Image (spheres, grey):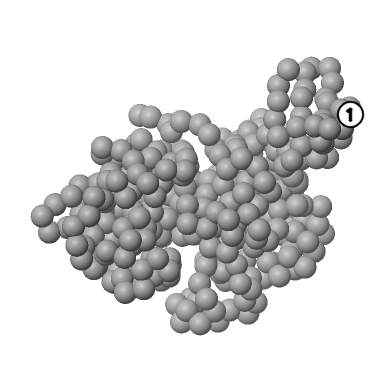
Amino acid sequence: MARTLVQDTEISADEHSFCISWNKNENPKFLTLEDLEEAMIKTGIIGASGYTGSELLRILYNHPEVEIVAATSRKWEGKEISALHPFLKGFYNLKFSNPELKNLESCDVVFTAVPHGYAMKYVPELLESGIKVVDISADYRLDKETYERVYGEHEAFIEAVYGLPELHREEIKKASLIANPGCYPTGAVLAASPLASKGVIEKVVFDSKSGISGAGIDPKEMTHYPNLHESIIPYKITNHRHYHEMIQELGNLQKDIEVSFTPQVFPGSRGILTNAHIFLKEDVNAIKIYEEFYRDCYFVRIQDEVRLSWVRGSNFCDIALFPGEDRVVVVSAIDNLVKGASGQAVQNMNLMFGFEEKEGLDYPPLFP
């Protein structure tokens, strides 16, 4: 007989029956399969045609507490999911729908996997309807003033909880709107947070290299094969928008921190490798600080060294430390589509609904 947990509900099941005990002091209650399906979290994805949307479909298929009831795409409305995502053929009997509220109103939670500027068109109405939201766009990651300086006008600002569970776990549990972090800030902030929490950083320089899926599903000149093949391309060298998330989150830990950031793209599909060059105010036992800081963080693994291939397809962030005479170099590796986007979004959803944090995400990376 298998057991699982839906919020505060203990469920036992075999091939013939389901038994749910809502309270150990109460008599067991027997439910039908239909009742059990009703207890699952009904989930929608706005923007299910892109990389982060399809990654949500892949991850959530095996989540024991979730049922996908809506996957939206204006362009692909009415088409089977597998028509656009052949790798999902046989897993979903669901068609793309229009992202109208009537197609989402049965949802308990909606993921907005859309470019910045678009989530704000849906989020207020979803929240007003009592639907929780995990926004994977940039629309709610920054305060309004900073957002408008960096991205442009915000037409529907609402304060959200920044969805980096390793820093904001308790706030996430009580939130209705989560701003899922950007891919670069996830790897960078996790690389520097333990030392920032001690107030010992003089300056940190983030040098990050990303696979090309971080640029999105639409082709661009930079992503054209002859332009990227056998090359590494630095871009937005001193003015990438994700810099402001790094300043925000690390600044919450250490007010006087200085941050520099340069991103590059390499000719691979997935992954972000970040070299964090951390210049310190004083000598510290950095390894001990990191081990203590991430002691209860399942998805952060302290390694002797890191490889992108050791986290591929997973929600792990691997970190290795290399103390030097003039600085500590902290190297982090994540899958930009999982811990850097959709996997972290599911991690946030788990916290919001009282599930175990690693539910649906507890599987080894794909290697080699």
Residue type marked 1: Asn
x and y, in percent, of residue 154 in the image: 58, 79
Q: On the rendered image, what quadrant is the C terminus found in?
A: top left
185 to the left or right of 140: left
Q: Compared to 161, does 145 lie above or below?
A: below
Quadrant in which residue 14 is drawn:
top right
In the foreground, 283 or 130:
283
Residue 17 seen in the current view: yes
In the foreground, 142 or 95:
142
Please count the marks in the image. Answer: 1
x and y, in percent, of residue 8 in the image: 74, 40
Give the residue pinned by disc 1: 27
Tag 1 secondary structure: loop
Q: On the rendered image, what quadrant is the N terminus found in?
A: top right
At 53% from the left edge and 46% from the top edge, which residue is drawn? Answer: 343
Quadrant in which residue 312 is drawn:
top left
Q: Compared to 164, does 257 lie above or below?
A: below
At 75% from the left edge and 46% from the top edge, which residue is drawn? Answer: 42
In the foreground, 4 or 119:
4
Within-10-Å neighbours for mark 1: few <14, some 14–19, many 20+: few
